[in-house]
Image (cartoon, coloured by chain):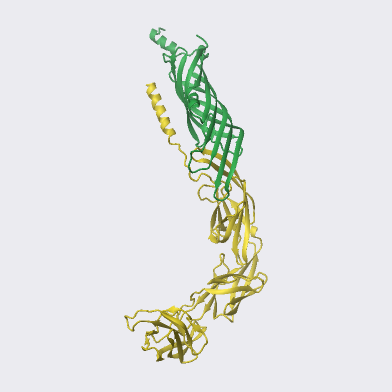
Amino acid sequence: MCIPASSQEEKQRDSVTLRDFIPSGIRVGADVYALIRSQYDDRFNGWELNAEMDVHRYFVAFEMGNWQLDLNTVDADDTGPAVYANKGTYFRIGADMNFIPRDTHGNVLFLGARYGRSIFSETLTTTVMDPVWGQRDVQFHTDDANARWIELTGGLRVRLWKVLWLGYTARFKFGLSTHGTGNMEPHDVPGYGSNEERTTWGFNYLVLVRFPLRK
Amino acid sequence: MIRKVALYFVFALLALSCLDEPDCYNLNNNVIGIAFRKMADSRADTVALVGITLNGTDSLFYPMRLATGVELPLDVLSGESEITFHFAGIYGPFTRTLRTAYTSKAQFVSEDCGERFIISDLRLEDHGFDSIRLVNDAPGRNPTTNYIIYRCPITDRMKISFRQLAMNEDSLGVPMDVFVDGISPDFSPAVLYPDDTASTFILPLNPESESVTYHFDFTAGAADLAIGYRRVTSTRFGVCGNQTFYADLVASSDNFDKVLVVRDSIRDPAVTNVLLQRCPDTHLVKIDFVDQHGDDGQAIPITLNGITTDYAPDVFYAGETVSSVILPLNDQADMTRFTFDLEAGPIDVEVAYTRTPVVFHNTCASMAISDLSIVSSEFLSEPEVLSTETTFPVNTTNFAIIPD
């Protein structure tokens, strides 16, 4: 049977070989926003590293970071003095799917998911002002609290120059569960964010370097 | 295209993040609601509270209040609350305690709001009520019901009502406030309602006997009321045990004008079983002080040292300034002389009338007064006769006097 030349090329392009599943490189980067915020926001100190490795049109992603918050109510008008601090380390593991695998520049537009874990501590020192029981100074402290959650992710990776890449990841976070929090309800979970709502959003602005693993 | 989509995505997320400012008002959910209900019908029960106290504070909640439910704060820095209810009972105040445990967690909310406390996992530890049910283990920021307190039926309380009868066909009369020094049941040393003024009183029946006599101490004397009844013992609610129920009430008294049983069974809450009725006063005349006789006459106040009669030592309206007085006629005679002791001196007025024996409400033997007239008067102007018959309640002016 005779197959036209153009059809043969298309078939060749669509076919997936075992070689496609061998990672071609690994991208390692850092969250620029966290680094900049740490410099200019006295209340925040943190960093986050990201690594992702391609497997065909998918990426295996691993992220880890650390953040700490120092908040207080010194400037508030209608509340007693309260000082809050937390500190913790977190990691996320998951996968993304590239929706433009044939982009000539290798850029990536992806959707994915993550499973996150965090181990953190919290301290709250405050003066409780109660109309019935009066004014009382108290301190709450939690060590080794842990949390887990799920994220849906989406974002871009754009090759800037040679091995240098830029990108961002947007995160829809949900399903937070915390454990070992003692007599405190977490205000902020490192890696997840505010515990006020059942769902929350997150962003990473990334600068990455790609290390090729094969030609 | 990809860049545009990415930019829209970024701006949308930034906008959403601005809508997440917390509200600092009423952050703690440390208010528990407690409802009172009757076991018999699960309907709201009105309780008389002297007050409610909580451990760890001197504050008194709901002082001297009638309530079907209360809302109380929990101490956010504690894990347990002992709530003591002080109720008003006919034998005096009594207390019941409810001890509840809970979990309190502190949470930093924001730099504007500070911290809040989240109370959860409400647990009943101990109580002194007949029955109690935890219906919601999460206290709220707004009123909610966490506990329902049920009480067993109160079967041994009858209610009496003091009534004033009128000179008409109304056989029930109108509520009448009376002042009692105290009411003593014959089976108990307790003195109920000391120095109390009311028109109704709830009294206990004697569970050990088929009758009870109450001794009423009034400022002007004493009176006894005897109540008979039939007793039945049964268990209607397991938690309440064996209870005595009362029926077929009968009442008698030699001291009250009229005793009428209007309901011969006991209800919970108590409803009036017995009316203690006072016969109408048929011998009262009303005298107005006016500036002139006729329709244009205006009431004018006068200051009295007192008013006396020719048949009794009582002094009426002593030291009072009044524009109208109600005075008793002598129902044992056809004429009464009133002496008005004014600043200028005493002035006599003699009133004549006709007496006719009548019986009101089948019990009240009285004299109907009619044909009222002025026999003599030391006032410069002759008193004007406006009505020649007495009424009760006194709502008709009989004489108008110009106090010149």
Q: Is residue A4 visible?
A: no
Q: Is residue B182 visible?
A: yes
Q: Is residue B46 above or below residue B19?
A: below
Give the left or right position of residue B144, taking residue B207 as reference. left
Q: Nearer the viewer, residue A33 or B315?
A: B315
Q: Nearer the viewer, residue B95 or B247?
A: B95
Please tell me which residue is depicted at 51% across the width and 22% down the height of the picture.
Answer: A95
Q: Is residue A133 above or below residue B5?
A: below
Q: Position of residue A9 (x, y in %)?
A: 41, 9
Give the left or right position of residue B357, taking residue A177 as reference. left
Work out which quarter of the rendered image holds the N terminus of chain A and state it. top left
Q: Is residue B24 above or below residue A66?
A: below
Please tell me which residue is depicted at 41% across the width and 12% down the height of the picture.
Answer: A10
Q: Nearer the viewer, residue A209 or B273?
A: A209
Task: Count the numbered circles shown.
Answer: 0
Q: Nearer the viewer, residue B27 or A7?
A: B27
Q: Position of residue B281 (x, y in %)?
A: 48, 82
Q: Is residue B184 above or below residue A173?
A: below
Q: Which chain is yellow?
A: B
Q: Which chain is green?
A: A
Q: Position of residue B311 (x, y in %)?
A: 50, 89
Q: Position of residue B80 (x, y in %)?
A: 62, 48
